[in-house]
Structure formats: structure tokens, C-alpha cells
Image (spheres, rainbow, N blue to C red):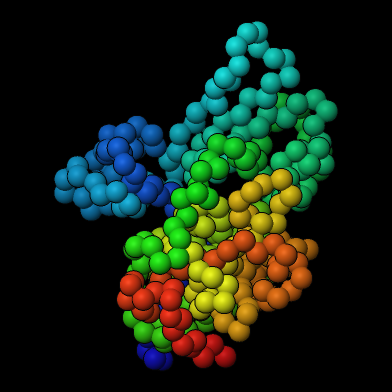
Amino acid sequence: MGKSLRLVFSIFFILVFSSGYALSAVTHKVKNGDTLASISKRYQVPVGKLKNLNGLTSNKLKIGQTLIVTSDAGPSVKQKDKTKGPANKNQRTITTAKNEIPGEFIQYKVEKGDTLESLAEKFDLESDDILDLNNLKKKRLSPGKVIRLPKPEGDNDEIIALAPEAGSSHPLKKWNNEDERGMLVKVAKSFAGAPYRYGGDSVRGLDCSAYVKKIYEIFEVQLPRTAREQFCSGPKVAQNDLTTGDLVFFRTKKRVTYPTHVGLYIGDGRFIHASSYCRQGVRISSLSEDYYAKRFVGAVRVKTLQPESSEIRTSPKEPNNS
């Protein structure tokens, strides 16, 4: 147990510090109809480089396969205006930001009259979130400045419909034993106190989904970058069947229908997460707290101790996380 724990923490520190605190990488999950050529064109990465990055010896891909794309690739595509007729003088130009995970953020050109408060209201954010996302110190926005903002709701609403139901045949990786599952909690707690930063992905500041993604990378599970996508990473779990390692989701924004916050369940009704509330950072909270109880929208299991056929129906014994 002691030797295994030391090994996990060694891997953890190598992953975090050897990359200058980087906690994210651009990946692509292969969908029906994808080819290496189409993925190459989308991310502007040569086919040969894609094959080298992923150790591929042929051009064949499997649906559901996760490909490493690199951390500095991404399309820069203008969003087309579908309305006909003369251009609207109030129309904003928004693009997918280069070097960002496709679909997560847009580029927004600040117009005269825009303020932090008005944009925060429009995009259902806190003013500090916009400052965090763009490394801004001044609260005044200059017209013409291009900033990053989260992609508006509407383009990918079908994601929630794709979340598999409990008991589905969604593929799950296996924990080696209960001790390994307990290690997940110890590694997660080692981040306690790390500051929250909207859109951040390093120990100097990170958001909820970046935190969960990095913890599970250490245990050989590649999760998507956003809470909204992570909600589709495994079969749904009833709240009374939660077990250590499950992902718990909350809808914390007023005008969206999908999960906007995620944490790791650690047993006894508690979960650990990167909290934006008063910029508290990584902390442990309870599902019974009024704020989270009202906003809980579901849970997902991404790794299991049980055979897939019996997963969800029988909850394994909780490890000792003290």
C-alpha cells in the first residue's frame, strides 16, 4: 500500500511540475464518420504528427477512441451569421479562440458601451470570472479589445440527451482494488487550498472541471474538459448509490439547462471540488448543504470495482478515506 501510494504521488508531481503546472491537453474523441484526414483538417495538425502522437501504425480509428491533438492546436473559425439581408451594425463578431479546446470558448470583440457587469449578465457569469478568464487586472474594457467568453448555450444542447442511463453498457475502466480508489481521495485532497480561477487549469488557479480532469488523468481516465461534457463520461448513478470516485454535478447558473459545476464524491455524503464561491478554491463540501442540495442534477460513474453487468445495482464497500 505504502509503495503504491508513493508511486501515485510521484506520477502526480511529475505530471504537474514537468509541464510548468500545465493541467490540460487538447484531445479529440473519435465520432462516427471521423477520419484522420478530417481530424487533421479540423485541428490543423498534419496526419503524420497525429499518428506519432498517438502511436498509430495505420489510418484506422475506432469510435470512442481518444486522440491527443496537442496543446497548441485549434481551429479559428468565424461563426457564420445565418440571417439574410444587410449586416446588422450591432452584430458581434465571435470566433472560436485559437489554442482553446474547440467549442468551449468564443472570442468576443468588445463594443462601445460594454462593461464587465453587462457582459457578466449576458453570459451568466460573475465579473471576476471574466477577469480570470482573460488575465485582466483592470475592470474597464476598451472598445475593440478581443476577450474570451464561454460559448453561449444553444449549440450543443444535445449533450445532455446523450448521457447514458444507469445500467447501460457504457464502457468503464476498473479500479485495481479498493486501496487505489482510496488513493484517488488522497491525491484529490492534496490540492486542498489551491485557488479557484475560472477557465484556469494549473495549481496556481483552476476551475472545477480542470480539477476533476487532472485527478482522473493520474488514474488513467481521460475526461473531457468541461463539466457539461463530463456529465456524459459514464452511466448515471442515483444519489443513494453514490460511491467514492463518482462525479457529482450541479446547475449553478440561472439561464442554462446543463450542469455547470462538478466535484468528486469522497464518501459520507461529501465531495471535493474547486469552488468559485468567494474564490474558496479546492475544498470539501456536503451534498446536504442547502446550496448544493437545491442544485444537484445528477452523478456519473467513470471507473468501477464491479463487473459492468452488476455496476450501479450494487454499491461496493466504501474505502477508509480518513
User: Residue visible at 66% across and 32% down?
Assistant: 108
* Nearer to the camera, 44 or 10: 44
Instruction: Please identify the quadrant where the N terminus is shown.
Output: bottom left
319 and 146: which is toward the camera: 319
* Residue at 27 percent of width and 52 percent of height: 54
Residue 62, given in percent of the width and then of the height, sits at 25, 49
Which is more toward the observer, 176 or 166? 166
Q: Is residue 223 visible?
A: no
Residue drawn where x is 76% and y is 70% of the image: 290
Whole-percent x, y for residue 318 in the image: 49, 86
Vertical placement of residue 283 versus 124, above or below: below
Image quarter of the C terminus: bottom right
Q: Can the viewer see residue 296 in this picture? A: yes
Q: Residue sitting at 43 percent across and 76 percent down?
A: 313
Q: Residue furthest left?
A: 57
Residue 147, position in %: x, y?
A: 66, 37
Residue furthest out toward the top: 86
Horizontal and vertical percent position of residue 272: 61, 73
**Of 87 and 141, the residue lying toward us:** 87
Is 160 drawn above or below residue 74 in the view shown?
below
Examine the rendered structure and indicate whether residue 249 appears above or below residue 90. Answer: below
Q: Is residue 7 left or right of residue 136?
A: left
Along the horizontal axis of the image, is 139 left or right of 303?
right
Count up the numbered dots.
Answer: 0
